Amino acid sequence: MPKLKRDLTMEQQLARGPLDMPFLMLVVLLTVIGVIMVFSASYATALNQGRQATYYFARQAAFAGAGLAAMYVISKINYQHFRWMSVFVLGISIVLLILVFPFGYGKAEVGAQRWIRMPGIGSLQPSEVAKVGVILYFAARLCKRNTEKKKHFDREIPKGKALAFLDQIGFLELVPYILVLGVVVLLVLLEPHMSGTILIIAGAAAVLFAAGIHWGWFVGGGGFIVAALWFIITKTPYMTKRINLWKDPWAYPKDGGYQIIQSLYAIGSGGLFGVGFGQGRQKLGFLPEPENDFVFSVVCEELGLVGAGLILVLFAMLVLRGYWIALHARDRFGSLMVVGIITLLAVQVFLNISVVTNFMPTTGISLPFFSYGGTALMIQLGEMGIVLSVSRQVPAPKQG
């Protein structure tokens, strides 16, 4: 009993270690700047809808406050508990992805059914939960990879030889991950939600790579994914239209290309130092829903190349600090979780910036901490709470 009590005390002390202050301050700074930019980007939209000018800002600020509080609470949890919780998070995300088809909405607005209404809260995008669920589940299983007993097969029979070969090249190990990822990706693709699919695959691939899966599988898997995406893009009207709009949005100024054209006008008119905070013109009825996926266009117009560049530097610093935490994590599970979450964040920022600059086809992908959306912001801050939970148990540097 005394030994058990001593072990519990040690575990509690580890979970109560200091937060990684650079990471925390970067998250808070980006969240605050994001909420302020939502106010600038949304007040014209709110007034045009007959609402108070601060409608979107007030809601986003409230969710940001709740999200920061939730982040702090999650950071106080011993991250080892996320091992058993991973199965439930993954299961809930799959159930939500299924429920989005009979109970979701969005088909009439954007041609894709991706959201579920949450009474009294707003909307929930199940793919946001799925991203976290896949990362947690993969990290929980793969952290035990080097301690699992090797399988033995009877090489005297053809079946045993085949299984032994598949085990030797690592295929049998990947089967459960392929099945889980396949189910989640298929449900997200059926919405359809191409950017969400890419993000889920990116997070999963990051955890698999960090766990030591042979690089050859990533080459083969990448080739398969590229082929599948090519088929989807060229054979489905939804994605074919997106590609045509991307190649020449000015050829479709009133049939899908309007938003990206206005986004490019906003970015170009910002110049080096911008037109000034709150002084942007494209949000005044020209750029559709500027507070959502295209909020970075408003940032570029009002803060210019310098301001937008500084925000990207903050994101880069956050990503680098996140990987630093992963490298110094107490154990393999914490390291894999952080790698998946930070890679997910980095890829999402890259995709959003690529879309608003027309570097990539337009997809429904938000900019973390900036785009309007309460539940999405809270989930993102919850993910940062997990990273901070891992940072609490980073071993202190040895003295001398």
Image (cartoon, rainbow, N blue to C red):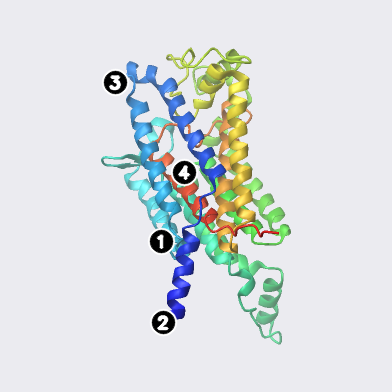
Which residue is depicted at the point 65% across and 80% down?
Answer: 159
The answer for how far apart the CA atoms under marks 3 and 1 are is: 39 Å
**Image x and y of residue 148, in percent:** 61, 75
Q: Name the residue under label 2.
A: 1
160 vs 32, left or right, is: right
Task: Determine which residue is flagged by label 4.
Answer: 380
Q: In this view, does 15 lie above or below 354?
A: below
Q: What residue type is labelled 2?
A: Met
Say which label, 3 or 1, has the lower sequence index: 3
Mark positioned earlier in the residue sequence (4 or 1): 1
Number of the label disc, if any, that sits on residue 51: 3
Q: Are marks 3 and 2 in contact (CB under 8 Å)?
A: no
Badge 1: residue crowd in 10 Å (few <14, some 14–19, many ≥20): some
- Does residue 114 appear anywhere in the picture? no
Which of the two labelled residues, at mark 1 and mark 2, occupies the earlier sequence position? Answer: 2
x%, y% of residue 1? Answer: 41, 82
Residue at 62%, 20% in the rendered image: 305
* Residue annotated with mark 1: 88
| Camera-side residue of 89 and 28 | 28
Residue at image coords 66%, 76% = 163
- The amino acid at mark 4 is Gln
